[in-house]
């Protein structure tokens, strides 16, 4: 481990950085990581990091261990496809169970898949697929992949529209462009919104999404938030409610990459409006709702990793659940930021989406 700012002190900065009213410093905990995607904190202080090419890495007190975790299932690694999220079971301390999401298949037919496995400290054991999106799609883009627990112990998974298949987001016979809700063994909860509806995939919790990149359960308020990529603009932060239609591609605040109009509508009857949206696009990635003690001024703020903007957006949540004035942080890193998490020590942890990415701890200056 080393202090990042000290390592470049003669180039750009002192060891601390002032952002608005809060000072912080960076500490690099692990590098190089090849396109890291997600972070999980184990009870013993170890950090697990997924790498998109298909490796699960261990970061201990002495830094990055040379050997990746054994037993990780084979992934389809191409473009945006690969090993994606990691989520610990809520009883991980006793069970050692964790969940991985990843792209599965090949370039002609592929899916977003979730497996359940037991981690013994070095190896994944009893690896069992519990969910695979249907139908298969081609290409190597828009997999979603983020997971979160609901208060009742059910698992939420965000998926993508497959990029070329945007109309599937409105198709309830397809898992593409949806938020999925399943039990921890992959079975379907009896109270899912479409569980008794003919010609609808019963795992669907909400639909009309483009490419879900974060899901956060605000346990204090009992609210599920998710954000998703727009095309050229129109990234969205949404409050997720069961059975609701979030509009893609019928409504959008963005244009296509060619600058062509995707739709003339930004609102339509029966479709939800975002809590906020970003135009131009920041390309939101991971997200955390900060509740730590190290930065009391930042409590009850969302921190949104941004790929295109190479930043983190802080979105304070005001009383009543409305977002306040945003703050743009950590642009001095000058790297795409893939994930950000609140650590058990009250620090923020982020990973940079680079061929030689880093795991970085953000804390007040010592």
Image: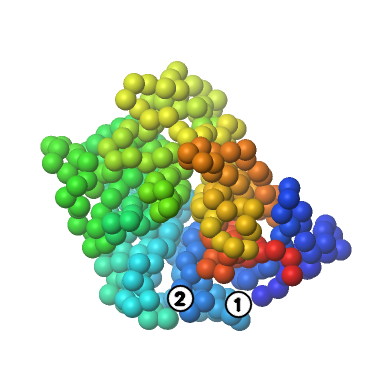
The local crowd at label 1, few if under 14, some if 14 to 19, many if 20 or more residues have their Cα within 10 Å, is some
Query: According to the image, label 2 marks what residue?
Result: 43
Q: Does the residue at mark 1 contact the one at mark 2 (Cβ under 8 Å)?
A: no
From the image, which quarter does the N terminus lie in?
Answer: bottom right
Could you tell whether 332 is left or right of 177 in the image? right
Q: Indicate which label's residue lies in the foreground, 1 or 2.
A: 2
Q: Is residue 225 visible to the viewer in this orientation of the structure?
A: yes
**Above/below status of 289 relative to 322:** below
Of residues 366 and 312, the one drawn nearer to the viewer in this rendering: 366
Of residues 98 and 35, the one drawn nearer to the viewer in this rendering: 98
Visual colour scheme = rainbow
Going by the picture, which residue comes out furthest to the top?
264
Q: Which circle's residue, 1 or 2, is located before the other in the chain?
A: 2
Mark 1 residue element? strand
**Above/below status of 260 relative to 135:** above
Q: Quadrant of residue 75?
A: bottom left
Query: According to the image, label 1 marks what residue?
Result: 63
The local crowd at label 2, few if under 14, some if 14 to 19, many if 20 or more residues have their Cα within 10 Å, is few
Mark 2 residue element? loop
Q: Residue at x 78, y 68 (%)?
A: 7
Q: Residue at x 54, y 50 (%)?
A: 300
Q: Quadrant of residue 317?
A: top right
Q: Quadrant of residue 99?
A: bottom left
The x, y position of residue 106, in whole percent, is 35, 54
Could you tell whether 84 is left or right of 300 in the image? left
**Above/below status of 289 relative to 210:** below
């Amino acid at each position: 481990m080393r202090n990042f700012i000290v390592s470049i002190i003669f180039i750009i900065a002192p060891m601390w950085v002032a952002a608005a009213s809060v000072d912080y410093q960076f500490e690099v905990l692990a590098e190089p990581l090849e396109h890291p995607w997600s972070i999980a904190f184990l009870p013993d202080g170890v950090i697990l990091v997924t790498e998109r090419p298909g490796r699960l890495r261990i970061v201990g007190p002495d830094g990055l261990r040379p050997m990746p975790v054994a037993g990780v299932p084979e992934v389809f690694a191409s473009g945006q496809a690969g090993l994606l999220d990691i989520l610990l079971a809520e009883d991980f301390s006793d069970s050692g169970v964790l969940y991985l999401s990843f792209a599965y298949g090949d370039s002609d037919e592929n899916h977003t898949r979730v497996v359940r496995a037991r981690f013994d400290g070095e190896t994944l054991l009893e690896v069992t697929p519990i969910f695979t999106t249907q139908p298969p799609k081609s290409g190597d883009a828009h997999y979603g992949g983020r997971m979160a627990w609901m208060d009742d112990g059910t698992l939420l998974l965000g998926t993508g529209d497959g990029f070329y298949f945007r109309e599937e987001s409105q198709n309830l016979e397809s898992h593409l462009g949806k938020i999925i809700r399943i039990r921890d063994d992959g079975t379907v909860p009896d109270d899912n919104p479409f569980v008794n509806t003919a010609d609808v995939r019963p795992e669907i919790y909400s639909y009309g999404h483009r490419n879900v990149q974060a899901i956060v359960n605000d346990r204090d308020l009992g609210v599920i938030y998710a954000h998703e990529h727009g095309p050229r603009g129109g990234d969205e932060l949404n409050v997720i409610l069961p059975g609701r239609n979030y509009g893609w591609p019928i409504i959008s605040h963005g244009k296509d990459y060619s600058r062509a109009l995707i739709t003339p509508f930004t609102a339509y009857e029966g479709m939800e409006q975002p809590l906020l949206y970003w135009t131009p696009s920041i390309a939101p990635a991971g997200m955390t709702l900060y509740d730590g003690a190290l930065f009391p001024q930042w409590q009850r703020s969302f921190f949104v990793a941004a790929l295109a903007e190479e930043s983190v957006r802080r979105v304070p949540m005001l009383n009543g659940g409305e977002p306040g004035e945003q703050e743009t942080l950590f642009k001095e890193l000058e790297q795409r930021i893939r994930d950000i998490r609140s650590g058990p020590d009250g620090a923020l942890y982020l990973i940079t989406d680079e061929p030689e990415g880093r795991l970085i701890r953000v804390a007040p200056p010592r």
